[in-house]
Amino acid sequence: MTEKFCKPAEATDFADIKENLRIIRENAAEAMDKAGRTDTLKIMAVTKTVPVEKINYAESLGLNLLGENRVQEFLDKREHYSENSEVHFIGSLQTNKVKYIIDKVTLIHSCDSIKLANEISRRAVACGTVMDILFEVNIGGELSKGGIAPDTLYDIAKQTAELPGVNIRGLMCIPPPGSGEIYFAKMQELYCEAKAKSRELSGIDTLSMGMSGDYEQAIKYGSNIVRIGSGLFGLRNYNLINQ
Ligand SMILES: *Cc1c(COP(=O)(O)O)cnc(C)c1O
């Protein structure tokens, strides 16, 4: 962790964000090289709690993929975002909120049940669109967390593949903090299996994993979207640094 990374979000200024991004891009490029990868990696700016001016500044540095966690916060901020930015929804999503985001995001990373897939389908069809989704996998088997258990993933994918208005693009995970590489390796396996198993799911091309603390490891295991919040904008939680 760099020193800048440890600053609380309130204390970061534009220069910090610029420097953080420089470091992240450099580290990511190095991790891609080390893994022998020449495919495209997307770096997402995770915007929760971040003021619009800082998001706009990140956009001005070429970060045009934004990740949203909270429906209301997103609805409040979105009109200020750059027209060039693409927005993905990455937070846990209640079925009754799907209608608010269905025509405002291009990928939902956090589909974690057939019930949610059904609602996304229903709302997408009503809007005349097709929504791209990832399945969030509870790869660490943590009881406290959402996400689909790996052994039920295939069933849920099969059922979802039959729904109109939904297009399965891949997998996402939030592994237990500090768990090392083991879960990224498992995710890579699941992702490759999913691609191989299902010809009808041939659009599968997205593996979303890796956050501020572990994106380099995730890249090693094939992640092609890393979701970075605090490493870019500063730590969100004062309790973590007030000592
Ligand atoms: C907050 C969040 C992130 C970013 O976390 P950092 O550790 O701050 O980079 C990534 N993914 C999801 C789903 C999040 O909620």
Image (spheres, rainbow, N blue to C red):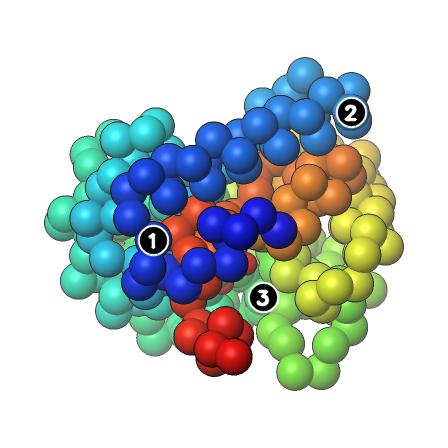
The percent coordinates of residue 5 (x first, y second) are: 51, 52
Residue indicated by mark 3? 112
Q: In this view of the protein, can residue 166 be seen by the observer?
A: no
Residue indicated by mark 2? 34
Quick one: which residue is furthest to the top in this view?
38
Earlier-in-chain disc, 2 versus 1: 1
Q: Which quadrant of the structure image shows residue 197? A: top right
The percent coordinates of residue 208 (x first, y second) are: 60, 46
Q: Local crowd at mark 3 within 10 Å, few (<14), some, or many (≥20)?
A: many
Q: Local crowd at mark 2 within 10 Å, few (<14), some, or many (≥20)?
A: few
Mark in the foreground, 3 or 1: 1
- Residue at (17% x, 62% y) in the render: 76
The percent coordinates of residue 238 (x first, y second) are: 42, 75
3D distance between C-alphas at marks 2 and 1: 31 Å
3D distance between C-alphas at marks 3 and 1: 34 Å
Quick one: which residue is furthest to the bottom in this view?
144
Quick one: which residue is furthest to the left in this view?
79
Cβ(mark 3) to ligand 1 < 8 Å? no
Q: In this view of the protein, can residue 32 be seen by the observer?
A: yes
Give the side of residue 183 with respect to residue 48, left or right.
right
The percent coordinates of residue 34 (x first, y second) are: 78, 25
Earlier-in-chain disc, 3 versus 1: 1
- Please name the amino acid that badge 2 sits on: Lys
User: 223 and 23: which one is in front?
Assistant: 23
Residue indicated by mark 1? 12
Which structural element holds mark 3? loop
- Residue at (74% x, 64% y) in the render: 178
Which structural element holds mark 2? helix
Mark in the foreground, 2 or 3: 2
Q: Marks 2 and 3: CB-CB under 8 Å?
A: no
Earlier-in-chain disc, 2 versus 3: 2
